[in-house]
Image: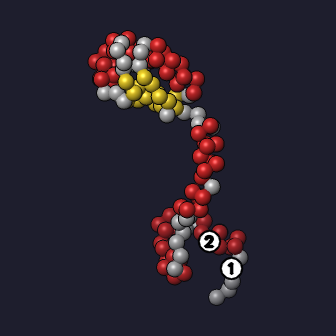
Amino acid sequence: MAKLSTAELLDAFKELTLIELSEFVKAFEETFEVTAAAPVAVAAAGGGAAAVEEVEEKDSFDVVLEAAGEKKIQVIKEVRALTSLGLGEAKAVVDGAPKAVLEGVNKETAEKAKAQLEEAGATVTLK
């Protein structure tokens, strides 16, 4: 059998379907007794510093209502103002605390919502 260059191998792989590639990977793993999966431990090894940086660069937040406090009615009003929920749905969110009030919002919106809910007497966290 003629030896194929890397470029020739890549061209051959480009012509295969996903099913054919999957079968090839399985056969390759069995033949050479290896796995194509990246080791998890290697990715986690540098995770300490990377995790801290990732938290700092986070761009979407969830505003989580932890507790309504003593001014439950004011908190329900704020939940309604921040969301498009009706009275009953807003009450269910407040009664079901801890519960996400807003999900996937930017930092500025999350901080404003947190401030408004805390002014109303709620305990709020950003995740």
Amino acid at the residue labelled 2: Ala
| Marks 2 and 1 close (CB-CB < 8 Å) | yes
Of the pair 87 and 66, the residue shown nearer to us: 66
Say if 65 sits above or below 72 in the image: below
Which residue is pictured at 56% across the width and 28% down the height?
Answer: 106
Of the pair 122 and 99, the residue shown nearer to us: 122
Which residue is pictured at 34% across the width and 19% down the height?
Answer: 90
CA distance for labels 2 and 1: 10 Å
State the colouring used for the structure image: secondary structure
Quadrant of residue 88 within the rendered picture: top left
> In this figure, which residue is indicated by the disc labeled 1?
4
> In this figure, which residue is indicated by the disc labeled 2?
12
Q: Is residue 86 visible?
A: no
Say if 93 sits above or below 1 in the image: above
Point out the tag, 2 or 1, that comes first from the N-terminus.
1
Which residue is pictured at 41% across the width and 19% down the height?
Answer: 122
Say if 49 sits above or below 18 in the image: above
Q: Is residue 115 visible?
A: yes
Give the x, y percent position of residue 4. Answer: 68, 79
Q: Mark 1: which secondary structure?
A: loop
Of the pair 61 and 21, the residue shown nearer to us: 61
Q: Mark 2: which secondary structure?
A: helix
Which residue is pictured at 52% across the width and 25% down the height?
Answer: 110
Image quarter hosting the N terminus: bottom right
Give the x, y percent position of residue 51. Answer: 59, 46
Looking at the image, residue 97 sits to the left or right of residue 45; the answer is left
Neighbourhood count class around disc 2 (C-alpha, 10 Å): few under 14, some 14–19, many 20 upward? few
Looking at the image, residue 116 sits to the left or right of residue 5; the answer is left
Amino acid at the residue labelled 1: Leu
